Each structure stands twice: as C-alpha cells, then as structure tokens.
Amino acid sequence: MANQVLQPTRFDEHNIVKVPDDADVDLAYLGPLGCGLQTGSGSVLNYLKPEPGATIAIFGMGPVGLSAVMGAKIAEASRIMVFDLNDQRLAMAKELGATDVFNSKDIDVEATVKELIPGGIDYSLDTTGNGFVIKNAIHILRPAGTCVLIGIGGDIQINVMNDLLAESKKLVGVVEGDSIPQEYIPKLIKYYQDGKFPLDKLIKVYDFQDINQAFADFKAGKVFKPIVRCECDPASSTGRIS
C-alpha cells in the first residue's frame, strides 16, 4: 500500500464535532471518543444516569467497558464491580476506579455478587454480547434494576417471567452511548482536562507500518485502545499512506 493516494472525503455537516479551542489532547486521541469511549461512558452517564451512591456491574473490560468504569466513577457510584477474563484489563479497571474486580473464570458470578450485595445491584452493563454473560447481568439485578446491552451478540434465550417481569427488571439496548456527539464529545474532552476521564491510559499510537504489532498487542492485552496513525501530505488535499 506504499504511496497509495487517499481521495478527498466529503462529510455531512451533521457528522462533524467542533472541538473546544483549548482542547489539549493529541489529535490521535480524539478518534476513539466518537465510538468506543463515547459508547461505554455515555451508556452510563447519558442513559442510566445513576444517582450518587448507586451500584453498577460492568462485564467486559475492553475499551468500551473501561470507559464505562470511568463514567461510573464520574457519576459517583459507590460500588463499581467489573468482570473480565484478562487480569491486565482488570488491573486497569481498578486503576480507573473499579471498586471490585473479578476474573470470571475463577468465580461464580451470581453467587459472588449476591454475597456482597444481597439485595442485588442497581445497574448492570454488558459489553461482551455473550448470552451466558448477559443472563448473569440480568440475574444479579435488584428488583426494578436495569441491564444495558451494548455488546454485539446473537440469540439469547431468557424466561420473560422469571428473568424480567417477576421483579420488574429492565433489559435495554443502547447504541453509541445514547449520545448527541456534538454535545457529549466536548464534555468528554472537558472531563479529560479535569483529570476525570484519563483516556490516555488506554491509548497507544502506532505508525501505519506497525499495524500488525498493534493488533498483536491488543489481542495480548498489552494495549487497550491501539491507534494507527497514517501520514498525510499537508500540502495537498490528499493523504498518502506510506
């Protein structure tokens, strides 16, 4: 792909977000705010809107789940319980504000949560799309609790009466954090500037020729949100991948 010319791209004005003039984040860091980081944190802050002191469980500590942890901390949740299979991701979740971290392969999730919070948890959020995990996320809720699904998955079989209706539980899907990007992304930048949304801890920037290393590092859990930077020719309206 050396010296491949990138044709100019037209954007609809509704897809453009104005960044605050005093934004001090590297431009490479801004891209993830429009997708994964917006999705995770927005699902907490824009949709669930947990009251201070609420309890929340988050399943899957990829960049979406980790951004949800940061959102829950901003919301002042009293208990932020997280579950994953990768200890490095769990360690990062702890650093970002999780109060309880669990490797799911080592525990019975439902029994563990019920022992720690006998009445059930207020909110749960699944980023995995795994049917078994989603059922765990539903079962650990308190009566009238809410489970949000943001992971891409397939079919799941639940008992509507036992799993939802009997205790008035809610199961909802949320896209892109229920966000208006033009309003929410500037908020995330302000959170970053105030030290409340340390997205730089998740990100590592790679040159384009190191794209395979970026994939490998992400798969191994060494990097939480790899970004591949392409070189562009500032003297023309086209970019070049070198």
Image (cartoon, rainbow, N blue to C red):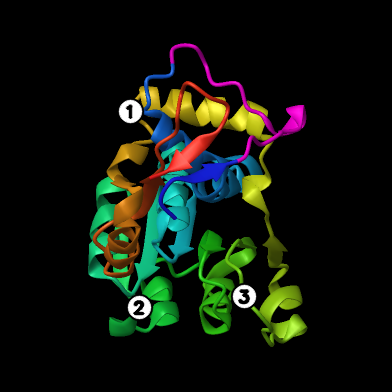
Ranked by sequence position, the earlier of labels 2 and 1 is: 2
Marks 3/2: CA–CA distance: 19 Å
Q: Is residue 109 left or right of residue 149?
A: left
Q: Nearer the viewer, mark 3 or mark 2?
A: 3
Vertical placement of 122 versus 235: above or below? below
Q: Is residue 141 left or right of residue 101?
A: right
Q: Which residue in the structure is indicated by mark 1?
A: 195
Marks 3/1: CA–CA distance: 33 Å
Residue 185 point in image, percent of width and height: 56, 31
Residue 139 in view of the camera:
yes
Q: Is residue 99 left or right of residue 152?
A: left
Vertical placement of 125 versus 167: above or below? above
Residue 98 in view of the camera:
no
* Dot 1 alpha-carbon crowd within 10 angstroms: few under 14, some 14 to 19, many 20 or more: few
Residue 129 point in image, percent of width and height: 57, 73
Q: Which mark is residue 187?
A: none
Residue 32 point in image, percent of width and height: 48, 43
- The residue depicted at 43 percent of the width and 74 percent of the height is 114
Name the foreground residue: 61 vs 4: 4
Q: Which residue in the structure is indicated by mark 3?
A: 153
Ranked by sequence position, the earlier of labels 3 and 2 is: 2
Q: Which residue in the structure is indicated by mark 2?
A: 104
> What segment carries the magenta color?
7-22
Vertical placement of 22 versus 139: above or below? above
